[in-house]
Image: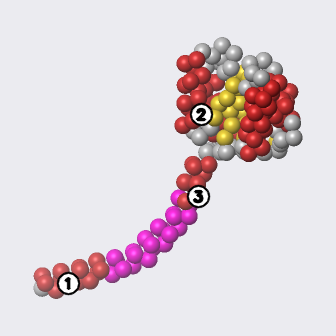
Amino acid sequence: MDRAQKREAVAELNAVFSNTSSVVVTHYSGLNVAEISDLRRQMHAAGATFKVTKNRLTKLALDGTQYAPLTDLFTGPTAIAFSDDPVAPAKVAVNFAKSNEKLVVLGGGMGDSQLDVNGVKALASLPSLDELRGKIIGLIQAPATKLAGVIQAPASQLARVLSAQGSKEEAA
């Protein structure tokens, strides 16, 4: 990699760190190509990205971003997972690490706050943005559905009474 390529890589990573809402730092030592490809597929399906990075270039890219405190995590074979959805990279990384002990979650960051391993696991246990949106819509729709049922109930009861009265008169 020549200097121009390194500058380009640092600029690209700096843009990632400046524009993403969460970053998870992992050690991937011992993962084979098939396992990393599987992890990348899972990340992509969740709307996140998994990228193996060069530590020196990543430390340069972190400088001046909100994730600058993560610099100490970049030793050894590291990779980052990032996304605009703050929960997605943590959720996929933690779930993958449960089934494959070769992936080790070191920590991460969300916004201006640095997260340790337990912080990343806590973030992974939260519902995703789409799940939260679904719950909010369900909560908003529930009162309207109940209100429609309450308003409709007297009319249906009145119709049943009139129908029963009509049946009585026909029988008589």
Image position, residue 22 (x, y; %) = 72, 41
Q: Which of labels 1 and 2 is toward the front?
A: 2
Residue 59 appears left or right of 132 = right
Instruction: Look at the image and tell me in which quarter the C terminus lies.
Output: bottom left
Residue 152 colored magenta? yes
Residue at 50% across / 69% down in the picture?
A: 144
Distance CA(mark 3)–CA(mark 1): 45 Å
What residue did someone put label 2 on? 43
Residue at 65% across / 31% down in the picture?
A: 50
Give the residue type at disc 1. Answer: Gly
Residue at 56% across / 32% down in the picture?
A: 42
What residue did someone put label 1 on? 166
| Marks 1 and 2 in Cβ contact (< 8 Å) | no
Examine the rendered structure and indicate whether residue 152 appears above or below residue 83. below
Q: How crowded is the residue under tag 3: few (<14 C-alpha within 10 Å), some, or many (20+)?
A: few
Q: Which of labels 3 and 2 is toward the front?
A: 2
Residue 93 appears in the figure: yes
What residue did someone put label 3 on? 136
Q: Which mark is residue 145?
A: none
Decide whether the magenta segment is chiefly helix, strand or loop: helix
Looking at the rendered structure, the secondary structure element under dot 3 is helix
